[in-house]
Amino acid sequence: MALDPLPDLQRIFGFPDFRGVQRDVVDRVLAGQRTLAVMPTGAGKSLCYQLPATMLEGTCVVVSPLIALMHDQLRAATAVGIKAATLTSVDTNREETIARFRAGDLDLLYVAPERASNESFRNLLSQAKLSLFAIDEAHCVSEWGHDFRPDYRLLRPLLDSFPDVPRLALTATADAHTRADILEQLGISQEGLIVSGFDRPNIRYAISGRDNVNRQIADILEKIPGPGIVYAQTRAATEKLAEALGRSGRPTRAYHAGLDPQVRAKNQADFVASEDMVICATVAFGMGIDKPDVRFVAHAGLPKSIEAYYQETGRAGRDGDPAIAHLFWGAEDFARARQRIGEVEPERQAGERQRLTAMGGLVETAGCRRRILLKHFGEERLEDCGNCDNCLGNVDAVDATETARKFLSAVFRTGQMYGVGYIEGILTGVSSERSLMNGHEALSVYGIVEGDEVALLKPVSRALMLKDALRTNPHGGLEFGPAAKAILKGEAAVSIVVPPKRERRRKGAVGA
Ligand code: ADP
Ligand code: ZN
């Protein structure tokens, strides 16, 4: 007879009902079926294995990639009275945990993936009854995923040596390609895939060109008094931002892996408890943090993929109240990302490049951001969302092909070695010692851009880099990329999104 999980959900977790696809997932697990659950951050993935773990006989083995994450989960599970333990290199009570496992006294046993290849661990698992294998952050098993971890490949033989124990893989972030790969890698059939809705309708998305990012983010603080997260690319940048934003009078903290662990933990705890704090963090921040009232997430630079962007922005507005996600980007971000891709293992470059292009499509679009975002996760929308910067009309897409040709022409005529600023100077006819000495003031492109067109030069340079018509050399000089020729010849058009004007952006403010 099928088990009804609802009474246990209410009794153990105190929730009146399941949310979204939780019920479907739990039912499959209780029926012993293999499942891959793709659910956005905050959708309540942990419950999908924690609840069956309390209902089924035996221990549920949870594979999780980060020790810190495991300890968070352990605390949460223990708090509701679930018998749980972690078995990791940093735990000092391993003997006790092993004894409890053997005695059948654990509902949940959290382990790191590297343990899976360990013969003695396999032996241990065969000494007591197992109820379930839960594989958290399952995208780590896929080279197509954005966070491949070779250790996850060791799981399959372990799972296969317990063929009767059901398996549940969970992830928040998986595009179609990654999903298919997870299913195959973990031996789950296609019908075991359960995907929950990805839309977060209360989050308003906005994406702008970066220009004085401190001020741009300070503007957000002015509009939104509630707690916020600002993601920056480097540790140093998080500290600088925290300092600059602190001058607005808001409490601010930095958070990155280089901080003393005690300081880091305190900053995180302060943030979780605060109603107005802004935390400036690297992407290390946020995993396992349960703060429902984050009112904004700002990015000071480009995230490395749409998955990462979605996960990071998803930390805003978990309580369902209005929240905003504002990303600021510059052409340099793409140049840097391309450089980084050049340094990863050759097999992974195609995937990384595809992720960067998808991210480029999202920032460059003049259309509805949410539609692009959801489409990326396999949800087709026919309607525009009405709650992103582009839908709210804060965008002006213009055809800038002529300006782009002038720009490329100036790069070419000056020998493909100068940076954006110098090329701008030539095109706008700003005389300098350098341009005089180089004899560039005699070029036909000197001073051919004037009036309103001047404002297009920076966005055009960004668009050209995005399209790979221009590349930067290690000294910051611009040179032609493969897409330059077609544009110069007038065979390809360049349209750009002019960053929203400040006054108009204010109109779209979200009260908090
Ligand atoms: P995820 O791992 O998918 O990001 P969590 O498992 O951390 O999400 O759950 C997010 C939050 O939602 C937690 O605070 C959790 O207690 C809560 N939650 C989970 N399931 C339910 C439910 N059925 N009803 C109400 N709250 C829930
Ligand atoms: Zn929209």
Image (cartoon, grey):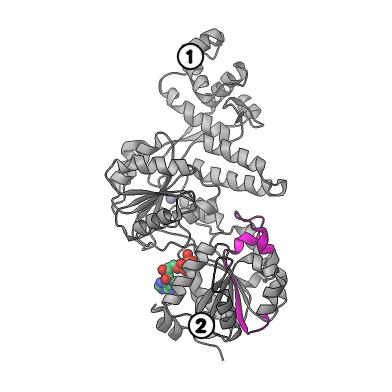
Q: Which mark is residue 447?
A: 1
Q: Is residue 453 depicted above or below 150 in this figure?
A: above
Q: Position of residue 442 (x, y in %)?
A: 55, 7
User: Mark 1 is on which residue type?
Assistant: Gly
| Residue 357 falls in image quadrant | top right
Task: Provide the residue designation for mark 2.
Answer: 54
Q: Is residue 468 magenta?
A: no
Screen quadrant of the C terminus: bottom left
- Give the residue drawn at x 35%, y 41%: 243
Q: Is residue 399 depicted above or below 437 in this figure?
A: below
Q: Position of residue 443 (x, y in %)?
A: 56, 11
- Give the residue drawn at x 66%, y 45%: 344
Specify whether residue 24 is in view. no
For ligand 2, tell me if the residue under mark 1 lies within 8 Å.
no
Q: Is residue 298 depicted above or below 321 in this figure?
A: above
* Callout 2 secondary element: helix
Q: Residues within 10 Å of mark 1 (few under 14, many from 20)?
A: some
Q: Which residues are magenta?
A: 126-153
Q: Position of residue 346 (x, y in %)?
A: 72, 45
Task: Specify the quarter for ligand 1.
Answer: bottom left
- Give the residue drawn at x 52%, y 20%: 423
Q: Is residue 39 depicted above or below 58 in this figure?
A: above
Q: Position of residue 401 (x, y in %)?
A: 54, 28
* Callout 1 secondary element: loop
| Residue 491 falls in image quadrant | top right
Q: Which mark is residue 79?
A: none
Q: Is residue 130 magenta?
A: yes
User: Mark 2 is on which residue type?
Assistant: Thr
Mark 1 or mark 2, earlier in chain: 2
User: Which is nearer the eye, 232 or 419?
Assistant: 232
| Residue 159 falls in image quadrant | bottom right
Number of marks present in the image shown: 2
